[in-house]
Amino acid sequence: MNSAHTAVLPAYSDYLGPAVPDSWRPLLDKALAADEKVLASLGLDLDKTLQFRSGLVALTDSRLLAWDHQTENWQSWSFREGLSLRHRDHAGVASLELVDAHARLGGWRFTLAQDPAARNLSDRFQAQMECVLAGREPTPPEPLTCPTCDAPLPPGTDECPTCAREIHTPPSTWTLFRLWRFAAPYKGQLLAGFLLTLVATAATLVPPYLTMPLMDEILIPYQNGQPIDTHRVMMMLGGLFFAALFAWGLGWAKTYILALVSERIGADLRTTTYEHLQGLSLEYFGGKRTGDLMARIGAETDRICLFLSMNLLDFATDVLMITMTAIILVSINPWLALVTLVPLPFIAWLIHIVRDKLRYGFEQVDRVWSEVTSVLADTIPGIRVVKAFAQEKREVSRFRDANARNLAVNDRVNKVWSVFSPTVTMLTEVGLLIVWGFGIWLVSKNDVTVGTLAAFLAYISRFYTRLDSMSRIVSVTQKAAAGAKRIFDILDHVSSVPEPANPLHLPKVTGAIEVKRVGFRYGNRTILRGVDLNIAPGEMIGLVGHSGSGKSTLVNLICRFYDVTDGSIRIEGMDIRSVPVSEYRRNIGLVLQEPFLFFGTIAENIAYGKPDASRDEIIAAARAAHAHDFILRLPQGYDSLVGERGQALSGGERQRISIARALLIDPRILILDEATSAVDTETEMEIQAALENLIRGRTTIAIAHRLSTLRKADRLVVLDRGQIVEIGNHDALMEKQGAYFRLYEAQTRKLDDGAIAAEKPRVPFHREHAPV
Amino acid sequence: MSTQNIHLERNAFGQLLLTDADGKGHAITPVRAFPIAAPTENIGLINAEGAEVAWVARLSDLAPEPRKLLEEEMANREFMPVIQRINSVSSFATPSTWDLETDRGPTTMVLKGEEDIRRLTSPALLIADSRGIHFLIRDRYALDSHSKKMLDRFL
């Protein structure tokens, strides 16, 4: 949209940031001097009192301009020494302040949607002012990139076209048709099933047709005194029997084929959803509840499968039957057929009215149902806490509340739903009544025979019962559509850690990591800003800081569990976002505070990252991780099963298994996230020994709460509120008496001195302090 | 330091300065401990390092002048628009763009998923939009019937 303007207005020619909103252009153009160029702009969406209101800040090659709502005019600040822009954000609102050494000159507020524009503006402000004041020619800035997918943004916008589309477009309401993607591979079977349905339905329509000759040519003549023609009767009864037999065989074949296909579609859907889910970033899992995701993959796919195999099939049969019946009826007697079909539009209308109400009713039912399962998923893993605090009653009442909400929503839906079926039945009866009445009148006028009327009644009684069951399609379709929507919600979710479009491949990894001006924001909280760190191959870095200072976030960014908001992380000089995720992660070994063991044998758990590892490799890894001895003490050795969370093993043992797991894949980069903080000091020493084997020769990034465990680090990086405040080794930092010194002091003072300093003998607390 | 003798002033940078008992000045930021449940109670005055310098148990305990400064500062810092009316929503399936009237003026927001609507202590709701702004609905039953109907489809 900007390109047209770029061509006309030279004032915006070398413009790379977000476009000046069209509504502001005339005003801004008036304020600009003849040869003045706009370099960057920030469209404000809030005013000073935080009301939603549009505003503008613009940077030109010689000054900063901002619209003042009070004076209805531009405020302007020419470049001079000491000016700077301060950029901050808090709780979803960011602010930009222009300050000099003595005071605040101006301030603007905006939502985080404008944040990239503000960052761009303040960067360019700094660069431009420095150049102007020094009399240098400014260097052209780098083009902006999308914070989500890292693609370069088109000039004049601050929104990546692909990412914006994903955020703003709601999924189509015809979600069910999207299931075709999963049905397409079974086209042949589906066609066969459809043809079988067609023939089978036609076969079921034969018996009522035969009632006509039975009535008119046999029964009525008999009442009028003619004998029964046994041969004809046998022929017709035989016809009835064979039609039924034929319909039975075909019905069986079609149901079997279509059920087979729909079961496969359901299975494909389930696997695809799970596969997609595995590819999503941690950010997605952080925002979802386990129970809800489990319900989506389990119950929803099952519901869709049921819908396809039962309901949709029945519905298709019904539609076929109604069409065929209508054709037959019209061919027998158009007038009677017309009367018979009159109630049909009414029923269609009724279905239409109820549809909307039911659809969102069922969506609500689903959501409430997930809420019930979520309560289960919340409390069952936390059962120890529940019991320890004796809150069983409270949890039961929480469950009861969720269940009560479930009931309330279901009651509301059922209110509409329960009126529905009886109404259809009633309409059926009324319809039959009309046909009887009109039919008798026609018979009395000798327009139709009694046999025709009987055939009509036989047809439409089927016809209407089908309508009744057809009306059920409304609710099941809505349910299935709601389910499909929830499945596609997952499938449509693009990983916030996307695979690169043109992946580059890593050369041999030495373990050099370069963190360049990295910033990270989660929701509306800024967690890291401006982090710069170069890590040499084989170096051990200790990350230190209060909890919440951003240590784990930095590690998560290096593992690429999340993508950085600003800046970049490079490995061997390549941005990690340009390398395929799995190829990159293969080089990383991760040891977490809470080692997670999957259900399976110890050997399987150790070989988790390298399933084809030989037994010798597994044993070697276990030996190096100091896990071998205790594994052999277990009754089944390496074949011992470890439970859902490795319940049978102690924390230190589990940790050593997870260290063996990391050792086995022989990564160049090793991340230890509080690997020893969940265990006691004695176990920690055992683990430390295991870790030393692991660390040797690898780039290691370790987070530890106990600073003493990081003594061996080549460099310690002290983080405070998302920024690096100090870098250096233990001795240098202690000498500096800065942030690290304070942390260390606080720890040695607070903790039992024996537990923290390994050199000192361990003295039990009570003994040392007991009065002698 | 007790609530009565909290002395505050605003400096040229627009920061609030608290002078403590020793006459030392601290640039402080007021932070509510319970922004939704009890906005006028339990307010921490936090310095630039994030440490608490003073604590205000109740705003009403303060002298009028510092109280005015604090309220001003908090109103300026906190941003949680209260939804007064939902004019329209682009679709009932998420992501959905909502056209809203708030106490901060009319605006639009994008709801990314139903899970971004969080139930606070009933009847309040907190809605996070795609930009990370939190919109508050104080009482969802007190909304007009049109808004209620719209909202209901997402709950």
Image: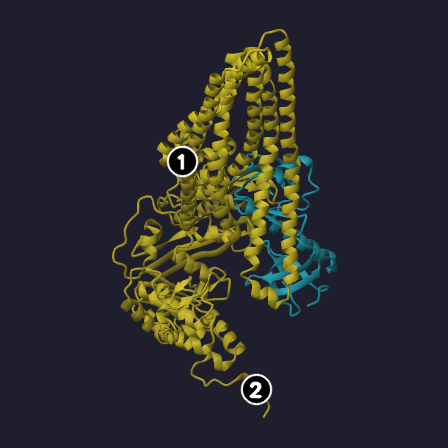
Chain colours: A yellow, B cyan
Tag in front: 2 or 1:
1
Residue B103 in sight: no
Residue for badge 1: A257
Specify the label residue A501 is tagged with: none
Q: Are marks 2 and 1 on the same chain?
A: yes
x and y, in percent, of residue B151 in the image:
62, 40
Q: Residue at x 61, y 31 (%)?
A: A354
Query: Which quadrant is the N terminus of chain A positioned in?
Result: top left
Q: Secondary structure at mark 2?
A: helix
Q: Amino acid at mark 2?
A: His
What residue type is disc 1 on? Answer: Ile
Q: Is residue A455 left or right of residue A677?
A: right
**Gap in angstroms between the C-alphas marked 2 and 1:** 81 Å
Q: How many marks?
A: 2
Position of A30 with respect to A185 (left or right) is right
Residue A105 placement (x, y as % from top left): 55, 49
